Amino acid sequence: MKIIEGGVTAAKGFEAASAGAQIKYKDRKDMALIYSQVPCVAAGTFTTNVVKAAPVKWDQKIVRESPFAQAVVVNSGIANACTGEEGYSYCEKTAKEAERLLHIPASSVLVASTGVIGMQLPIERIQKGVSMLTDSKKDTLEAGLEAAKAIMTTDTRPKYAAAQVTIGEKTVTVGGMCKGSGMIHPNMCTMLSFVTTDAAISKEMLQKALSDDIKDTYNMVSVDGDTSTNDTVLLLANGLAENPLIDQEDESYAAFKEALHYVNTELAKKIAGDGEGATCLFEVKVIGAESKEQAVILSKSVITSSLTKAAIYGHDANWGRILCAMGYSGAQFDPDRVDLYFESTAGKLKIIENGVSTGYSEEQATKILSQDYVTAIADIKMGEASATAWGCDLTHEYVNINADYRS
């Protein structure tokens, strides 16, 4: 696998655009378009929140029922959630405007929204935005980057990634972009992710690859424990790499999954590291587990612990909070056998051994915890399984951001 620069326009045949439609923000772009020059097979995963935004319902129908997809229209600022029939009708109106301007069926147009819940979209501005996007779409890396910027809300930086693999002597590219900073606790974040590939792959295999991969990527991220109404991951494949069709779980499928996993992992980590108000990416690895399920439960319990997240913000090696979070997770383990390490670019330090403090240097621990990427490794010595979860520290700024988000 080769890691390359780029996002949703890295794969052959994909174009992107960004526009300022002034949906909520008056000082920046707030709409994006992803367009494939040829029809794509599509896969998707969506929020499990009972309260689902109108775009989620629209996209579920498109992914499930439409023979192909060819465009995605995204807006930031307003989530189009809890907006009833009127909100759903705006998804259709957006798709029909794209149909008119891009000369593709409305049933091939996916839509996505992120922002404030409960507000209706200014549909005239959305439709005007679609026109601006259509006129400016390009297949350049810069166009992909600007699209990633346009879907941000409280995000502080754009998030994108791309990789290539060789399948049947053809170069296959997978690229993606996402947004997410707050209301992040996926269970399939507010999280939107869009991944494009020029791989030739069947719809069945594409959906299987995505559904399997989110378990170890997006679903292992948490910023604040809130599962959004709008969580959506869309994956489009247009086949322009001209590799032999991937229609079974063979070596070609494994190679494609490697590239997809890299892109999804990078995007997931970028979401966690850019959590609202965060100063660092906090990674938790549970190793030596009896089963993958046990490791997942334990790692996610630590990553969602508010007390642990606050300690990370304070660069305080308060390991008791980590052991406590593991203890109330519901997973069974022997706390008297746990080894715990903290690791970052400043070094690696064993904090506890067999459930007891090692008498470590607080000064060294603080130095390790003061970096912008911190890992806690818990070895529970029960087996060979492992899992990794990603989150961030909990800061005063998180409260400030969410106390006045609607204003």
Image (cartoon, helix red, strand yellow):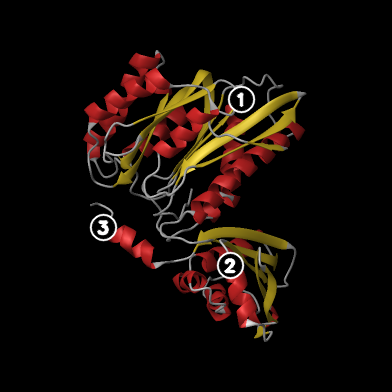
- For the residue marked with disc 3, what is the amino acid? Asp
- For the residue marked with disc 2, what is the amino acid? Leu
The residues tagged by marks 2 and 3 sit, at their Cα atoms, a distance apart of 33 Å
Q: Quadrant of residue 182?
A: bottom left
User: Vertical placement of 163 versus 117: above or below?
Assistant: above
Which of the two labelled residues, at mark 2 and mark 3, occupies the earlier sequence position? 2
What SS does tag 2 mark? helix
| 186 relative position to 132: left or right | right
Q: Quadrant of the N terminus?
A: top right
Whether label 3 touches label 1, CB < 8 Å:
no
User: Vertical placement of 165 versus 308: above or below?
Assistant: above
- For the residue marked with disc 1, what is the amino acid? Asp
| 54 relative position to 365: left or right | left
The residue pinned by badge 2 equals 298
The residue pinned by badge 1 equals 198
The residue pinned by badge 3 equals 404
- Image coordinates of residue 26 in percent, x first then y, are 26, 38
The residues tagged by marks 2 and 1 sit, at their Cα atoms, a distance apart of 37 Å
User: Vertical placement of 166 versus 354: above or below?
Assistant: above
What SS does tag 3 mark? loop
